[in-house]
Amino acid sequence: MPRTVVVVGGGVIGLSICWRAVAAGWSVTLVDPAPASGASYVAGGMLAPITEAWPGEESLLALGVESVRLWPSYAAELAAAAGVSAGLRKDGTIVVAADGSDRAELDRLASYLDSLGRRVEVLRARDVRVREPAIGGPVRGGLAMPDDYSVDNRQLLDALRRAISGVPHVAEAAADVRAGRVLLASGRTVEADVVVLAAGAWSGQICRRLSKVIRPVKGEILRLRARVGAVGPPRRTVRALVGGRHVYLVPRDDGGLVLGATQYEAGFDTTVTVGGVRDLLADAERVMPAIGEYELVECIAGLRPGSPDNRPLVGWLEPGLVVATGHHRNGILLAPVTADLVVATLAGADPPDSLRPDRHLSSVKGSQ
Amino acid sequence: MPRTVVVVGGGVIGLSICWRAVAAGWSVTLVDPAPASGASYVAGGMLAPITEAWPGEESLLALGVESVRLWPSYAAELAAAAGVSAGLRKDGTIVVAADGSDRAELDRLASYLDSLGRRVEVLRARDVRVREPAIGGPVRGGLAMPDDYSVDNRQLLDALRRAISGVPHVAEAAADVRAGRVLLASGRTVEADVVVLAAGAWSGQICRRLSKVIRPVKGEILRLRARVGAVGPPRRTVRALVGGRHVYLVPRDDGGLVLGATQYEAGFDTTVTVGGVRDLLADAERVMPAIGEYELVECIAGLRPGSPDNRPLVGWLEPGLVVATGHHRNGILLAPVTADLVVATLAGADPPDSLRPDRHLSSVKGSQ
């Protein structure tokens, strides 16, 4: 049985794998030029697989639900290991509709979830206001998903870094990965029994076999804070459908409110655009008028690691090389289940077929 | 004749006074905890007294026009002293109207300026588009003010700091000023033959006699940059009246575009609000649709030093204490004329009666 592993990528997936692999007895090294600074840092932190369920993506929904189930123990164990909170909030999520067409779309979502046996509660407009007085304007009702949570992703990253403070860290960019070997941009190499590639949107640049599989999906997100005298943030995560466009508002324990997120296919571009900020503010203000009074603390963009079918790739790419990437919008949500799957894989188990990396590689080969 | 002066405040007014006073033979000391970081740093840099003329403020208009006349030589001498550009652009300004009511307002402005003998050209909508193709949407014509300029305020501040690099700098906050003496927050004092108070919005906190005269007027401003493929910024400064609300777009040599500015009476609050950003973006996009594609580089707020009649206070407050503050929206514009007036005052001349500080002090005394 191999004993050493090098993890390439210090986002939420890579850091979670480091932490869990150390606990499983592995000798771990982390390679990342700037851990906790990519998509995991930018993210909103919704843990909301039911809210975001989509027909045809049932296996992703099941994986997300499984990961939410793991989240409370993952957060508790992480807090114990790190000595700080992991930032989990279990207040649930509501989804609201801004107009009649949005309402019809939510009704379809409710029927779909009902057919899957998922717990969802239909809310009239007044029910929404009673639960979340900050939600205003002519909202056309909504849905409540009490089992969809959220996490303060920056608290989470801080806790993960503390929990793995004993792990050797090579603060350099990786240029290539092979079985048991990482070539750094500097020309040096790092060797181990197994390499785990968890480099998010950059995975396809580091591993050529993934270059046509993993693509960056840009997202812009805003951080707000209630000012004195303004109506406070909602207690739950609020997701809204506004004229067919999605926006989410995720409250933080410190009075902050995170608004997200745009989605573009724009390559490795992380500039924040006027159009993105304008749309996020307009859609959020449509369902929560009080944000006009809020402080705009930060505008930031990140790159999600997209995969062709929106499901992550988790498993052996070849002997000595495991991948854990392609989490797209769901990296924070899927961190607990991914870390568990990777550690089980290292110990000889097989991850679910639906996540096998080679499901995309054969078609890539065929197209070349 | 006194030979030493201490200038309190390292914004554009204080720095300009330092530079000009040294050139006039004074031995100068600057007191500021963080020079070039306040309203002068936040500002848009319009040098547009004609564009912003307002009935009843004829003496302010005359002062602004005089300062614009001084600007080319001020900028050239500053560039020679500093070894870098002062950032002046002489491409002129146009004002556009978004709707019919805005058009009527511009017609009134044109008549008013005509009655004063000021040069202004009336533009039809198509004239606007020919001059500035980036201006789009259903604009209802405008006015051209070829004699209203702009300056990159951050280039300007950099040049001023280089030009006075030999001036001793006390990097502490001032707590009080008296004739010939500055009391620092640390308890230390700095003495000189004359103290010049040029502390912008903080002038009333440092000098109790001005506490009911100078007030902070908050303004939010955005910095954008054209992205690859987007329509470039206008060549001239564009000021727009959009449904009765003013917005300006000031181009920079580096492809940047500055959008400003909101105006609130909010005390010493420099948080950037969602509502301010939303309104600036909406109004600017109304007349220049391409900004939706621009990068949003910075959102920032500063505090203008407001005075009761919008005119600055320049002159002796008492023997040994000169003030140069209350420039409100016009600090960058009025820096050349203010510095000249202060240096002339130090040499024994009288500034114009319209700027005398005691025009406000008597009424303050009367109300106490």
Image: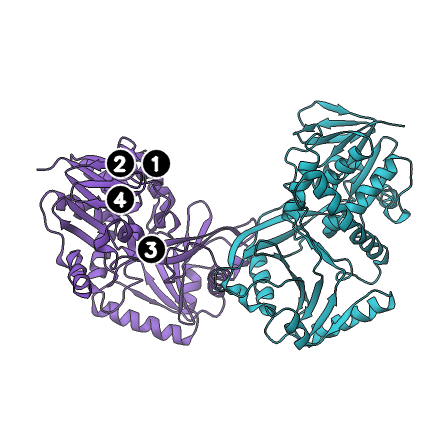
Chain colours: A cyan, B purple
Evaluate if marks 4 and 3 touch, with contact meaning CB atoms under 8 Å apart.
no
Closer to the chain start, of discs 2 and 1, is 1
Have a look at marks 2 and 1 and say if they share a chain: yes
Q: Nearer the viewer, mark 2 or mark 3?
A: 2
Have a look at marks 4 and 1 and say if they share a chain: yes
Which dot marks residue B304?
3
Q: Is residue A16 left or right of residue A58?
A: left
Q: Residue A350, position in %: x, y?
A: 91, 41
Evaluate if marks 4 and 1 touch, with contact meaning CB atoms under 8 Å apart.
no
Quickly name the residue at label 2.
Answer: B188
Q: Which residue is drawn at 29% across and 51% down?
A: B205
Q: Which chain carries label 3?
A: B
Q: Residue A32, position in %: x, y?
A: 68, 33
Q: Residue B242, position in %: x, y?
A: 43, 69
Quickly name the residue at label 4.
Answer: B14
Q: Which of marks 2 and 4 is in front?
A: 2
Q: Which chain carries label 2?
A: B
Tag 4's secondary structure? helix
Q: Mark 4 is on which residue type?
A: Gly
Q: Mark 3 is on which residue type?
A: Arg
Which dot marks residue B84?
1
Q: Residue at x 75, y 40 (%)?
A: A16
Closer to the chain start, of discs 2 and 3, is 2
Q: Which residue is drawn at 75% across and 39% down?
A: A198
* Front in this rendered view, residue B330 or B365: B365
Relative to A155, residue B133 above or below: below
